[in-house]
Amino acid sequence: MLLKLQIEDVSKSYKGSDFYALHEVTLDVGPGILGLLGPNGAGKSTLMRIIATITKPTRGTIKWNGVDTAKEPDKIRSVLGYLPQDFGVYPNLNADEFLRYMAAIKGVEPRAAKERIEDLLAFVNLLEARKRPLGDYSGGMKQRIGIAQALINDPKILIVDEPTVGLDTEGRVRFRHLLAELATDRVVILSTHIVSDIEATANDIAIIDRGRLLVRLPPEELLLSVQGKVWDWVIPSAGLADAKQRHLISSVVPHGDGLHTRVVAETSPADDARPSSSPTLEEAYLYRISSHRRVGDG
Amino acid sequence: MNRLRALLVLIQAGYLNKVRTYRFLIVLGLTIIAGYVFVPAPTANYVTLGWGSSTTFYRGTYDSAWIGAMVALLTSSFLSLTGFYVVNDSVRRDEETRVGQIIATTPLSNSVYTLGNTLSNFMVLSTMNAIIFLTSIGMQLVRGEDLTINLWAMIAPFVGLVLPLMFLVSAVAVMFETRPRLKGGAGNVAYVFIWMFSLPILSESIDLFGINAILSSMSAAGLARYPELAHNSFILGYGWGFPVGRALATFTWQGIQWTSQLLQTRLLLVGAATGISLLSSVGFSRFDPAREGRKAHEAPLDILDVKEADIPPVIQSMQVQLRPLHDKESHFLFRSMLLAECRLILGESRDLPFLGMYGSSVAGALIIMGLFLPLEQARGMMLPLAWLLPVLIWSKLGTREVRYRTDQLVFSSAKALQRQLPAVWMAGVLLALVTGGGVAVNMALKGEWPGVIAWGVGALFIPSLALCLGIWTGSSKSFEFIYSLLWYIGPINQVEALDFMGAVPESVKAGIWQYYLFISLALIILAFIGRRWQIQRG
């Protein structure tokens, strides 16, 4: 089955404003996980909402298997699983009732829905709490119900916006495994500002900042691109404030001989700084964002 | 000093929050229109204040004193009802935006909080009052019977009569919001009835609107000029059907005599409002859901004790496998959707005031009584009661997705407009059919088929009105207010034109249901247009 999402020159501005939440974004997405990485307010959620047909782009088109989603939104909606960043639940329904409701809306046959809900509640570990009103759930539990509803129709395209917010460490790891498993024959788009959420699972990483797509690369190529731009530098404690002012510091670890810092920079920050042999994805991300902002701010 | 500053900040924030909404602009627009229609032209076929027979209408000359008093009296009645619905969401807004939880952790006392909200409500209603006042000045010039503007004579009724009443309405709104049983829909419906029932009593006993004092002085001035005025009927409000060519007799009225008794009544209102405002702070939950009676009463301890730690971490078992769905398992079934909507309705009703288990028992009793009582009582009394009970359920139709922020989940599903919306409407219709079912069967058994048809149209009309208003206003408040008024004036007071459910035999005979069938269709179309816009607006 063909699974292809084409995002072509998509821009979004809001009425009465010159500000572009998204600016000429182009991406082709196939089966696998595309990780959308960017700081808060970068435009990730806007892009997710446009793909999910909630928001219409000001310019550009999005095609699902060749069909324009603005003209025929139901083509993508019928195979879509969507977990928005900010969503609510009906507080007086319990988990069972809410998932049955969402299954009915998404056209899942009742008997199949019953089995699927059992699986999903076991999967998100809410079997024990299934009869409690959602209004009494904690933030993390609501997030898990959100994950379950996004998977209720066994979607071919899964869009999850900051899905690990409110989950504990173990939950995040498990969720990543699930996504990796699902992504073998599905399109999964995962938006986050937490690099560790996608570094182990994403086939491709797209970095977005201030509404623009900066780069889209596999994680290993992204790491290669920052080779020679991360520096190990030992400085005295008293020099930290000054170093922070002048350089982008990705980590600081105190040692007996001073503070071991890692600096992200095109050139060596000091004569005694040494190029790091193992840059991280987080440093690649910081490098791309800071380079873009330097150019943008002129 | 800090307390005073906190109070001022609360008033300012509350005021700005309300006046920067479309709702305020809409009500302001309506208020200006009201100010215009309160002062009818001599040739208009309606009157608002005076004495009339079929041939002559007596009133004061349209000078500052008369127009000021007339518009102030009408504004009092108009805003004391509608104004409540403009301002009764201060506490709710803090609750929904979670700002309340931040406020709750500050040293701000409950009494300052409730007083601050009362005063910000008062500022909003005063703004509307001021706009009507300015419109009145314009209307005096437009009507042109006396072009001399006497500012004091014009403004005094607004300050002395309307403002104290607006203060009382502001305080009552806050009090309703701080009582768990009265906040939200239950309070919206209750206020209409409190307003309608207490109005005549309070007007008579304490001259709530100042009507008695003003009218006796107006009457004295009129009688001095036209003794025959004593034999004509008095009109305050909208008197329709006056012949266009009727004679007009005018007299000069000097304005309100501010007697000590009148002033005492106004001060009494201010005192009562202050007392109510402070009383609201007593027992106010301070945004702690556990302190609200509902939770404490209904929720067993194990629910209140639910903590993240009680539930094992997410996705604990790696053995859990998600079984794939096959293509044949994914096809839309309307009955599943309808069932899901009915479940949602029933799920919500558990938590609504006056509903839940007690409400279901009462509904059951009404169905049985509707079935066995004589026809006249069944449809004249049981049917209106049966169709009042679910008002808070109907009022949620069309508003849930926005209110509970499930809109992104629902609207990103395939064919939400064609699938989910009809199911929402149909669930509302089913509720009407079930709750009013006893009366329908009773009528059918007795061969009263026109009554059954009128009943059926009523069952279509109610959810159509709820859905349309819910989608277009985004709030359940408008339906709760309009339906309660309609229900009271039409079926209960037997005004045929407003009998939308066939409770009055004469309205059934006159075929009023045909109009409501047409209106229902129009409302359904409007609801679909509104929802389509919601889904597509991006």
Image (cartoon, coloured by chain):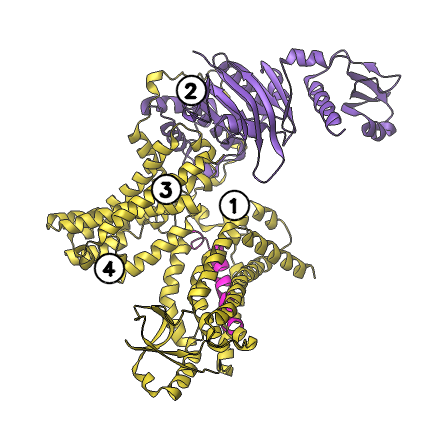
Chain colours: A purple, B yellow
The residue where tag 1 is placed is B96
Residue ID for mark 2: A154
Determine whether label 1 and label 3 are within 8 Å by CB: no
Q: CA distance from mark 4 to mark 1?
A: 41 Å
List x then y, in percent, for residue B161. 49, 73
Residue under numbered circle 4: B496
* Chain name for mark 3: B
Measured in 3D between alpha carbons, the distance from the residue under mark 1 to the one under mark 3, in whole angstroms, is 26 Å
Q: Element at badge 2?
A: loop
Instruction: State the separation of the CA atoms marked 4 and 3.
Output: 26 Å
- How packed mark 2 is, by other alpha carbons closer than 10 Å (few <14, some 14-19, many 20 or more), is many
Which mark identifies residue B527?
3
Q: Can residue B166 be found in the magenta stretch?
A: yes
Subunit bearing disc 1? B
Chain hosting mark 2: A
Residue B289 is one of the magenta-drawn residues: no
Residue located 47% across and 12% down the image? A185
Chain of the residue that carries numbered disc 4 in the rendered image: B
Magenta residues, dominant SS class: helix
* In this view, B277 is above or below B94: below
User: Closer to us: mark 1 or mark 3?
Assistant: 3
The amino acid type, in three-letter code, at marker 1 is Glu
